[in-house]
Amino acid sequence: MACVALLLRSPQKLPSTPFRVLLQPCQISANTAYIGHLRTSAALPADNVQGTQWFNERANRWEKETAIHSAPGSKYFHKDYMAVITKGSENPAYFIPMILERIAIRGGDWFFALETIADENPAKDCEDYESALKAWKEWMRVHGMTKEGDAVLSA
Amino acid sequence: MQCYQLESALENLKGTGYERYPISPQTDPAPKGYNCIAFAAGHQDRPWWPHPDKFLYYWPPHLARETVDLETAANFIRAFEWKGYKVCKDGNRKKGIEKVAIFLRNNRPKHAARQIESGLWTSKRGDLEDIQHETLKAVEGKAYGNAIIFLHRRRDGKPFMKDRLESL
């Protein structure tokens, strides 16, 4: 499966936001399966557990270290947030459901990361947090990224 | 009060005698749902910022939403003017006058503090607790930059005498 996924890998899209120029490639473990095309089924990388741990460590540290800031830019420019965007852009089908799951459970402003990774903003016209979350869940479903049996995201 | 997380982020805060605001056990854990700009403007129901996503931040509807990290001080001044404030020259205490200070870093708004009647300042720090601090200098530094813009309004809600005369 990993070999098929590697063959399917499309050239990485560059984010369109002004932040894109600042993104630096980060290290990605050798056994990570790349799925470049968003419509490819959301097969998880072989290092699923490690990937989740990698994300949670950075997300927790980001939350703690940016708690002092109100300015969204100060939060988004944090090294861990940028690392999630960079790695997420390499493998959107893996990271978008994981980020959305975190938003559903703990809240937090991960929408900028989602938008940058997906290069779309399905929540741009939403007026409240709940409808934004719903719009992203729908976007994820349309792109075949729904994690089956995931109670949090299907709620 | 001593908070390691605050003091490590705000290098000038340590030893300045800051306190929780209001001084009450009810402020623990830190109140959520608003930010420093909303708090300075007198609102504690939702965060204020000219962020492009309306579902994340409130901003006065007649004012522009701006690109993240390219926000302008003028937009923030207009938001406070909408609440009856006018730009003034400093943050010195004046009886019957409420003041707000806007902090800029690299010319971009990062924080705001509001002066309470005693002359002390109070701010909401991101997702952390509200504190009162004796000086603006105490929260200046790498995180928020410096208090550059000051605005004031009368505490009784009436317009300044100068404005009343001009409207005649």
Image: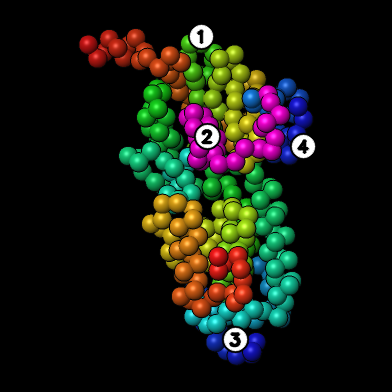
Q: CA distance from mark 1 to mark 4?
A: 34 Å
Which chain is mark 1 on?
Answer: B
Residue ID for mark 4: B4
Question: Mark 4 belongs to which amino acid?
Answer: Tyr
Quadrant of the rendering where the N terminus of chain A is positioned? bottom right
Q: Amino acid at mark 1?
A: Lys
Question: Mark 2 touching mark 3, by CB under 8 A?
Answer: no
* Type of the residue with mark 2: Gln
- Packing grade of label 1 (10 A; few <14, some 14-19, many >=20) is few
Q: Dot 1 lies on which element? A: loop
In the structure shown, which secondary structural element does the residue marked by tag 3 occupy?
Answer: helix
Q: Residue under label 3, please give it.
A: A5
Which labelled disc corresponds to residue B95?
Answer: 1
Residue B63 spot, x, y in % from top left: 35, 40
Tell me the CA gap for discs 4 and 3: 47 Å
- Whole-percent x and y of residue A108? 59, 52
Q: Nearer the viewer, mark 4 or mark 2?
A: 2
The boundaries of the magenta stretch are B23-47
Q: Is residue A113 left or right of residue B63?
A: right
